[in-house]
Amino acid sequence: MEEKTRQYDDSRFLVSNWMKRELSFLHKNITVEEAALMMVEKNIDFLPVVDELFKPIGVVTTLSTLKELMSGRGKELVSERMVTENIDIVHEDDSILEIYHAEKPYSLVVNHECTYMGVLTHADIVNALIFYFQEWKEIRNTAEVLNIILDSAYEGVAVVDENGIITHFNDAYSRFTGIKKSAAIGRNVQEVIDNTNLHNTVKTGLPERGVIQYINGQPMVVNRIPIFQNGRVVGAIGMLIFEGVTELYRIYERFREKSLLHQDSKHQPVKKEKSDFSLNQIIGESEPIHYLKKIVKKIAKTEAGILITGESGTGKEMFARSIHQLSTFSSGPFVSVNCGAIPEQLFESELFGYEEGAFTGAKKGGKPGKMELAQNGTLFLDEIGELPLLMQTKLLRVIQEREYERVGGVKKLKMNARIIAATNRDLKKMVENGDFREDLYYRINIIELQIPPLRDRIGDIPLLINYFLEKSCKKYGIRIKRITSEAMNAFLHYEWYGNIRELANTIEKLVILCEDPVIDLNYLPKYMKDKELFSMNYEPIKRRSIIDESKIYKMEREKEMISEMLKRTGGNKSKAAKLLGIHRTTLHQKLKKYGML
């Protein structure tokens, strides 16, 4: 009885650990027309509707809004036209084991105050169930578990045993083929599914992915995955892909990887790090962002050194956290180090830690360093271009030997952490100038991930504005504000030197200072609506990209930016650095570089 209680109370099964913290919602006083526009911009099928206390009171869907618009009711409030029935609401502290049978494709998640927190989808539930498959004690029959998982999938899924006999056949496959589950289970797969190859998959043990198979005369994309137990094939799963890459396939692959890790370290407690960052939460529909997300999914599973480059404020740490969450180190911690914010004389003790008595003022018992804290997880070295040369040498040795010592210590500590580095500087140029070690550069830069500046993906600006508007309004308990087309036009043509960080700060400031429900051009900062600046920024993107290839031009523009920000802040370097999206130490180095001190 004690074991059963522990299992249900296990925080790993809580809804809060698996839900999508998608805070997009509609206030009840928003019109149907505005709701439809928001769903089109965000490319989503539904949005929760909340009251003044941010409690969910219903949902609107793309279908419902379309019907209202066609009926000429676009100006009516969503509170009068929303769906109020057949809504599943779950608590963030509910256990997945108690709600896995939910029939709706999604549930709205609330906290203790019944405030809207996010969405839990069928895919999230399936993810949770498979992830801890091996540890289930409450559901004794694994066949029952598998049925739950398969029937939760939207794609057609069939499972065969080692003889090619169908043991599971989900509802989606049944609807597509027109064959009842009861008629399919127990028969040879070749008698039920056209042109199948699952019977051979159990013989060869070789997976097949993205294969074209004609079923009922239609070409379909299928995946076939062998099931191993104790080193031998005991069955296979066939997945019918209706749209894109199946979520279940990704989850099952993740489960297999976690199972192998579990076998190697089954005596170690499993700890899942909670994180507010994931690839899905990186906002953007532009081609560069789609490409980056695709690359991240490929490289995350490897242990190759990754260097993330891009201007300050572009979201380099979010991509680093996404890589961590998709990697085999995801169950460990994510430890971030800003190399530009630590004084040179303290860097070694901060990174490697120190023993008691290592130097005057050392804490009793010593102190673990960032590398030690990142054990079995990911160490993110932000602004690595600011790393002192001496520390570059020591870091290179650690990466090569996979071990290090605390300051003042003699004991060798093993390093088992993935290192991801990031910089807004040109490391290759630094190597040429002797400011960065060439061997370290090639160690950390096996794969480079270049994050584009916001001005090179202006199509994402409206999405980001909507996100930050909702976030800031909720933060300060303010009704959601709108932005006029004139103001949006100014946002689209401003350079955003501080990138996403500057955009977020600007939106938050406008939400606080603007007393009206609509933010128009008059509320924007003077430098954004200045006619001269506006006309300069209106220069075509292609022309700007050509000009930007000139390094001399870049340096001159950087000097102008720094000078402009210092004027705006009355010479306050800390505030100027914040506006520029860089650390104060980095600003000081640039001032020195350009002779502006």
Image (spheres, rainbow, N blue to C red):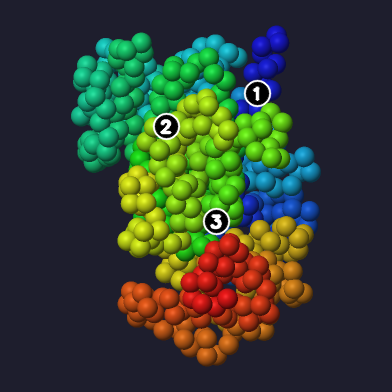
Judged left or right of residue 249, residue 145 is right
Q: Mark 3 points at which residue?
A: 340
Res. 401 image quadrant: top left
Element on which disc 3 rests: loop
Q: Which amino acid does label 3 sit on?
A: Gly
Res. 223 image quadrant: top left
Quarter of the image with the C terminus in it: bottom right
Q: What residue type is labelled 2?
A: Arg
> Which residue appears at 61% of the width and 28% of the height?
12
Element on which disc 2 rests: loop
Q: Where is residue 331 in the image (x, y as percent from the top left)?
A: 53, 31
Q: Position of residue 65 (x, y in %)?
A: 57, 60
Residue 172 in sight from this viewpoint: no
Q: Mark 2 points at which residue?
A: 402
Q: Do the residues labelled 1 and 3 touch (CB within 8 Å)?
A: no
> Which residue appears at 66% of the width and 31% of the height?
356
Q: Name the residue under label 1.
A: 10
Q: Are marks 2 and 3 in contact (CB under 8 Å)?
A: no
